[in-house]
Amino acid sequence: MKRELIALGVPESAIRTEIRSRNTLENAVFSARILRREKLENILIVSDRYHLPRAVLCFKTLGFSAAGSGPGRSVSKTPLNRWLYACLRETAAYPLYLAKMRAIRKRSRF
């Protein structure tokens, strides 16, 4: 995504990346540390459109003003069967993440 943003003219200095995470929740938690250190509160999450609701949920739960942007199905290079699988996976994952984020909010140190 970083390469895509740079190719679209976004200055590299405006892009923050996190490379340790293995899943969406870890990405939000690890990124939150970077964003807070830099005193950034408003963020734009760039990902596949089917993934954005869950990613935005995580960042909003951690206290950020978050919005998402990603290509629609019509411009995505993802094959249709993979796109449909991803949409089904996200539909199943979203309620699980709601529960995880509720638990994090209860014990939040963020």
Image: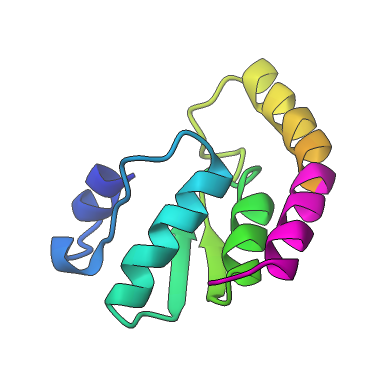
Find out whether residue 42 is within the magenta segment. Answer: no
Quarter of the image where one finds residue 10: bottom left
Q: Residue at x 20, y 50 (%)?
A: 7
Q: Nearer the viewer, residue 3 or 60?
A: 60
What is the image's colouring? Answer: rainbow
Residue 96 left/right relative to 17: right
Residue in the picture at 74% in, 48% down: 97
Q: How many marks?
A: 0
Residue found at x 44% / y 81%: 41
Image quadrant where residue 9 sits: bottom left
Q: 95 above or below 73?
A: below
Magenta range: 95-110
Residue 100 inside the magenta-drawn segment: yes
Q: Nearer the viewer, residue 14 or 94?
A: 94
Q: Residue at x 43, y 65 (%)?
A: 32
Q: Is residue 71 visible?
A: no
Describe residue 92's horizontal placement relative to residue 14 as left or right.
right
Q: Percent position (x, y) of residue 37?
A: 29, 75
Asked if residue 66 shows in the view, the reply is: yes
Q: Is residue 64 above or below residue 33?
A: below
Instruction: Name the main secondary structure of what is drawn in magenta.
Output: helix
Reply above or below: 29 against 36: above
Query: Where is the N terminus found, in terms of image quarters?
Result: top left
Rendered position, 3 above or below 61: above
Q: Position of residue 69 (x, y in %)?
A: 52, 59
Q: Position of residue 93 (x, y in %)?
A: 76, 38
Residue 5: x percent and y percent? 28, 53
